[in-house]
Image: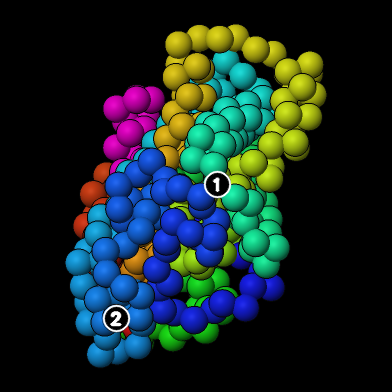
Amino acid sequence: MRDNDSATTSAAIAVSGGPESGTASGPPWPAGVGGGPDPGPAGTADHAPADAPAGATRSPSASRGTALAALGVAAFSLTFPTTAWALEGMGPWTVVMLRLVLAATIAGGALAVCRVRPPERRHWAGLAVVAGGVVLGFPLLTTLALRTSTTSHAAVVVGLLPLTTAAFGALRTGTRPSRTFWFASLAGAAVVIGFAVQQSGGAPSTGDLLLFAALLVCAAGYTEGGRLAREMPGWQVIGWALVLALPVAVVGSVAALATEPLHLTAHAVGGLLWLAIGSQFLGMVVWYRGMADIGVAKASQIQLAQPLLTMVWAVLLLGEHLPPTAAAAALAVLVCIAVTQRTRG
């Protein structure tokens, strides 16, 4: 899937290991991964993000950003199937709160080991949006929705996330993607909407309404996180957002465990571990770094592939049956991705 920060330019800001980045020593990831320092100085043509004005030179950082964003999407594509696994042995509130506690513990440990200084005051409002959107809001709303929706159906509805993220990004950063970009984005969204309507019979359920709400909060969190990742390493953006939400998660976990049944099966434990480590932390690390390199709008369009990947996992891991229109939708969406990735802002 967004504050009063004044930095809204579309130029990527190089991250150093000094006070400006909030680190006393570099993060334990290689340069350029998870927000590590980029090779080359800021302000050069090599560092123009993908949604920079037309004429900016596309560099290796743009290709790297696309690859990192794609890795993030691959991690996120497993979120719904592993949530379904976790729900086999836990209630929805237990799943969400425990995944948060685990992810925040990992993130807090990494921040402590690297002796990362707390973010500047101007960054906390943006981190609160990230925490409310992608750390708390989206996981909770989608987990509640998956009690009544199938994994494949939820994946298709959430396929609208790239369009909502691009719209939030354009409003928040003032960027103006090209007409072709928006045409391809709307075409991809139309495919997703048509598929969802055809499968649901045209009558949105309570689960659909929860998923639509999840789209909005996640898009806001993605947009704000991608913007912050231009000023601080991406792994620190999600790390501090998780730490910020930890008190809520601890209290919520205690309450959930006291009121919801708990059966620790292999699926439930495995699903919970992936949600905490893969989806909530590592996936967000590479995703925010990718957005910092290529821009919010274009990174968001890579997520058009996420519903299709999730459908594959739904078949392999959950044994769900996919409708025959899935292949046609997959091809159409992949064409839209190719167009948006070749279009300059």
For image coordinates 64% across by 73% down, the residue present is 5
Residue 188 picture location, percent across and down: 35, 66
Report the front residue among 216 and 127: 127
Under mark 1, the amino acid is Val
- Residue 122 falls within the magenta-colored stretch: no
Q: Is residue 302 left or right of residue 111?
A: left
* Residue range (magenta): 308-322
Residue 131 picture location, percent across and down: 64, 50
Question: Is 320 drawn above or below residue 244 in the view shown?
Answer: above
Q: Residues within 10 Å of mark 1 (few under 14, many from 20)?
A: many
Q: Are marks 1 and 2 in contact (CB under 8 Å)?
A: no
Q: Is residue 265 left or right of residue 43?
A: right
Q: Is residue 76 left or right of residue 31?
A: right
Q: Nearer the viewer, mark 1 or mark 2?
A: 1
Residue 299 picture location, percent across and down: 37, 64
Q: Quadrant of the C terminus?
A: bottom left
Of helix, strand and loop, which one carries label 1?
A: loop
Report the front residue among 17 and 100: 17
Q: Which residue is mark 1?
A: 116
Q: Residues within 10 Å of mark 2 (few under 14, many from 20)?
A: few
Report the Cα–Cα distance between label 1 and label 2: 27 Å
- The colour scheme of the drawn protein is rainbow
> Which quadrant of the structure image shows residue 184?
bottom left
Under mark 2, the amino acid is Thr
Q: Which residue is mark 2?
A: 44
For image coordinates 54% across by 60% down, the residue present is 19
